[in-house]
Image: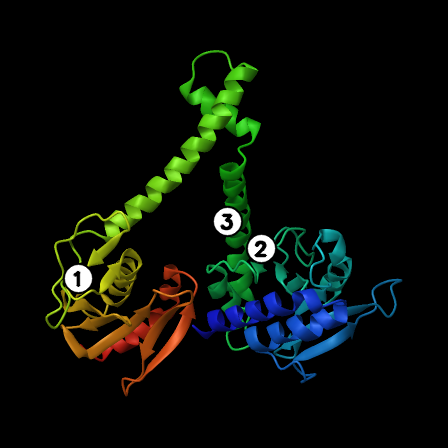
Amino acid sequence: MEILEKLNALADKVKQQASLIQTEEATKSAFVMPFINQILGYDVFDPLEVIPEFICDVGTKKGEKIDYAIIKNNEIQILIECKKVGEPLNIKHAAQLFRYFHVTSARISILTNGQVYKFFTDLDAPNKMDEKPFLELDLLDIDHNVAPELLKLTKGAFDVESIVNAAGELKYVSQIKKIITSQFQTPEDDFVKFVASRVYEGILTQKVRDLFLTLTKKSLTQWLNDQVNERLKSALSTNAPPALQGESVQEVTEEPEGVLKEENGVVTTAEEIEGYHIVKSIIRTVVTADRVTYRDTKSYFGILVDDNNRKPICRLHLNRSQMYIGLFDQSKNETRHAISALDDIYLFTDSLTETAATYK
C-alpha cells in the first residue's frame, strides 16, 4: 500500500527538517500541505478542494480563520487547525475547531503540529466536536494500524459514514491501548492492589504494596516476553515447507537467534517464516495452502505457488533496516513497497490475492 511509503517519506522529512522550522507558517508549508496533498490526496492549490485561511463568522467572532478546509462533493468535510512543529497539542488549542465544527458541514476535524495529527468527530453529541480524538498519528512513531483508517479519509476513498461508524471503536481502543501501555511501564497503585488482592491473602500494608509493585512490573514484562516467544515458536514450527530447487533445509530446531540455517549459507529468519505464514493465510482463499511454498535466497525471501519460480506471489526483503514487500505485475515485474512491520503485509491483501488468482 503506497500510503505507508508516503507516510515514511514524510516522516523522514520531519526528522530532517523539524529542527529548522521556526514558525507555524513554515510548519504548514513543509509538513501539513504535503500531508494534505500526498497522504490525503487533495490538491492544495485547487480552491475547489482545499481552502486555506477559511473564514466563517461565528457569533461575535468575526473574521476568524481556520487554517484549511477540505471540500468533497461540494461540501466542507474536513477542517484542519495547525500549530508550529514541536508545540504540544492540547484541547485548548482547538477552540476554533470547536466553533467552526458546529456551524459547518464538516464531520471530521484535525489538530496538528505537522508531526502529530489528532482526528476528531462528533461521537458524544451531534454537530459538537468531541474533546478526545478518535485517531492519532505520530509521524515519528507510526502505528501501522493507522494506515487503513487514513485511507478512509483520502480523496479517492472518502466515506464519512464509514469513518464515523468506525470512529467509536477506534477512539476507545486507542485509549485502552494507552492505559495498558501505561500499566506496563508504571503500574498504578490501584492496579497493583487489584493484582495483589487476587494472589495475596494477608493485609496489604505499604511494605506489601511496594513488594507487589516490583512483582507486578516483573510479571508484566515476563508475560510480554512469553507472548513474543510463543509467536516465534509458532513461526519456527516444523510445519514450514521445504525450500525449493535443491536448497534443502535442515530439520527445524529452536535456535537462540530464532533462525533456520541452510546448507548453502542462506539464513531463514523467524520474521521471514512469519511473513510466509501471513501471505499463506491471505491467499489460501484463492489457492489451497498445500500449494504455497517458499524459496529463500541471500537477497530475498520468495513465496511461490506449486514449487514453481514462474508462479511468484511476492518477495519479502526483511533483512535490512527498511523492510519491503515486492509485488509482481502481469509481466512478472517486481515493485517494492516499504513496510514498517510484518502486519503491514495485510495491507496488500487485494494485490496478493489477485496475483494468486492467476495461478488457479
Q: Which residue is mark 3?
A: 173
Q: Amino acid at mark 2?
A: Phe
Q: Residue at x 28, y 71 (%)?
A: 300
Disc 1 is placed on an element classified as loop
Disc 3 is placed on an element classified as helix
Q: Position of residue 338 (x, y in %)?
A: 42, 70
**Residue 136 in sight in this render:** yes
**Residue 105 in sight in this render:** no
Q: Amino acid at mark 3?
A: Val
Q: Residue at x 20, y 78 (%)?
A: 311
In which quadrant is the N terminus drawn? bottom left
Q: Which mark is residue 134?
A: 2
Q: Which mark is residue 262?
A: 1
Q: Earlier in the sequence, mark 2 or mark 1?
A: 2
> 169 or 246, which is in the foreground?
246
Q: Earlier in the sequence, mark 3 or mark 1?
A: 3
In this rendering, the answer to whether 119 lies above or below 4 is above
Q: Amino acid at mark 1?
A: Glu
